[in-house]
Amino acid sequence: MSRGELWDLTDAAGIPTGRTHRRDDPDFPSGLFHIVASVCVVRGDGLVLMTKRAAIKDWPLAWEFPAGSALTGESSADAAVRELAEESGVRVETAALTLVGRLVERLALFDVYVTHVVGDPVLELDPEEVCEAEWVPLTEALRRSGAGEMAGPWVPRLERLGKRLAELAGSARPSV
């Protein structure tokens, strides 16, 4: 998380407006959005990567899938790959991502991706972003959401996209 990062603004359909907004600046333009992307990483054994937010972040010590805002000039998939690498150390190619779905939130278009990896990737957690990580069954992630153990915004996200995520998490083949 970088204070002062610059985001491209889009309309509700995700079409760039040519305008930008600096993170934490007041007065986010009404009716516009920035892109936020997340990745659910699935190992060959079917377990998914969950990360626990650092104590200094909003929704402190809550679980989530790695996520973050797209920076100016980045596509949603580029942002998903960058955020995954920055927060967890797991590196994948954008071509290895499958879009689960896009949700329109108050200020963001939130994209959820799934990717499959081989083996047991070495995790390198960014302590400013993540304080813990676990590989768990997707059912455990869904349980954590329902039990209030995930960051609050994840509850409606998983209510809307959980079934599709489960289908895609169980169907794709690992990328090499």
Image (cartoon, rainbow, N blue to C red):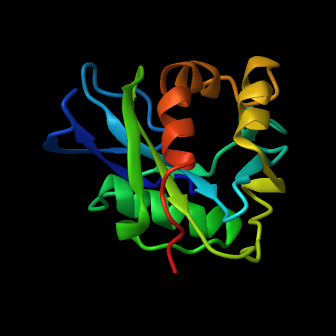
- Image height check: is 176 above or below 41? below
Residue 118 rendering spot, x and y as whole percentages: 63, 74
| Snapshot quadrant of residue 88 | bottom right
Which residue is depicted at the point 61% across and 67% down?
Answer: 86
Which residue is depicted at the point 53% across and 28% down?
Answer: 163
Q: Is residue 20 left or right of residue 46?
A: left
Residues 136 and 60: in front is 136
Residue 60 rendering spot, x and y as whole percentages: 80, 36
- Image height check: is 142 above or below 138? above
Figure disc tally? 0
Residue 29 rendering spot, x and y as whole percentages: 28, 26
Which residue is depicted at the point 38% across and 47% down?
Answer: 99
**Quarter the N terminus occupies:** bottom right
Residue 51 rendering spot, x and y as whole percentages: 75, 50
Which residue is depicted at the point 82% across and 19% down?
Answer: 147
Q: Is residue 29 left or right of residue 139?
A: left
Q: Is residue 45 left or right of residue 159?
A: right
Q: Is residue 51 left or right of residue 117?
A: right
Residues 28 and 126: in front is 126
Residues 108 and 37: in front is 37
